[in-house]
Amino acid sequence: LIFSRNKPLAMHFLWYFWKSLSFQYQELKHILYQHYAGTPYVKAKIEYLPSTQLKQKQIHTLSSVCGFNIKAKDTVLFDYGDSPSSMYVLIEGEIHLIHKSLTSHVENGQYFAEAALMDKSFNSTYQAKVIKNGSKIIKISRDILHNLIEKDESTAYEFLSIVCKMFAYKLQTLKKLA
C-alpha cells in the first residue's frame, strides 16, 4: 500500500532489493562452483537453468522500455567465452543455448544470460544461437537498467519489479542445487 502511494520510495526499495539479489546470486554461484569444482559442464548447467516464463503483460512492459529485435536464423547472440553485457528474453521464435553436447531450448517468454546484468566479469559457458528465422528478442542491457530513473516512475517501477522477480526465481532455483 505504501509503495502504491510513494513510487520514489518503491523505486529505492526495488533498487536495493535488486542489489541484494545480485550479491546473493554472486555468493551462491561462487559456493556452487567451489562445490562442483568449477567444471565447465556443471558451470554451464548452473548458468542456464530453466527460467520461468514471463506473462504477456511483463513482456509488453520490458519491450516498451527496451524495444525488441528480429533476428535471422543462425545469428549468434553471443558465443562461448564471450562477456555479454545484456540479458535476453525470447518473445517469439526459437533459440538454443549450446554447450558442447548439451543443448537447451529457450521457449517463448523465457529469458537467459541474466548473470550478465549482475556480473561484469561474466563469461558465457555456452553459445546462444537463433534457430528460427524472424525470432523476436528483447535485449536488456546494464545501461538500460541503470538509466531507469529517466523513465516515468510507473514504467520504471514495473520494469524493475519484473527484473527482481526474474532474479528471485533464479536464486531460488540455484539454492535448490546447494
Image (cartoon, rainbow, N blue to C red):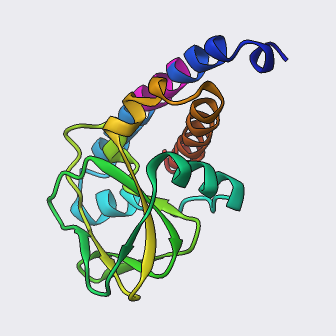
Q: Image height check: is 150 above or below 107?
A: above
The chief SS type of the magenta part is helix
Instruction: Identify the residue at image location x=61%, y=49%.
Output: 61
**In the displayed image of the protein, which residue is found farthest to the left?**
81
Q: Is 146 drawn above or below residue 122 in the view shown?
A: above
Q: Is residue 143 visible?
A: yes
Residue 102 drawn above or below residue 62: below
Find out whether residue 102 is within the magenta segment. no
**Quarter of image, res 146:** top left
Name the quarter where the N terminus is drawn. Answer: top right
Camera-side residue of 5 and 79:
5
Percent of width and height locating residue 121: 19, 39
Choose between 156 and 125: the one closer to the eye: 156
14 lies left or right of 65: right
Magenta segment: 16-24
Relative side of 169 to 84, left or right: right
Q: Is residue 31 visible?
A: no
Left or right placement of residue 32 versus residue 107 in this view: left
Residue 34 quadrant: top left
Task: Assess whether residue 23 is covered by the magenta stretch.
Answer: yes
Foreground pick, 45 / 143: 143
| In the image: residue 25, left or right of residue 5 | left
Most distant residue in the right direction: 1
User: How many discs appear?
Assistant: 0
- The part of the image, by quadrant, that contains residue 9 is top right
Measuring from the top left, give residue 158's x and y in whole percent.
64, 37
Q: Position of residue 31 (x, y in %)?
A: 36, 37
Residue at horizontal 38 percent and vertical 78 percent from the top: 96
Counting from the top left corner in percent of width and height, residue 172 is at 59, 44
Picture residue at 26% right of the left edge, 47% below the top: 85
Residue at point 68%, 17% (across, down): 7
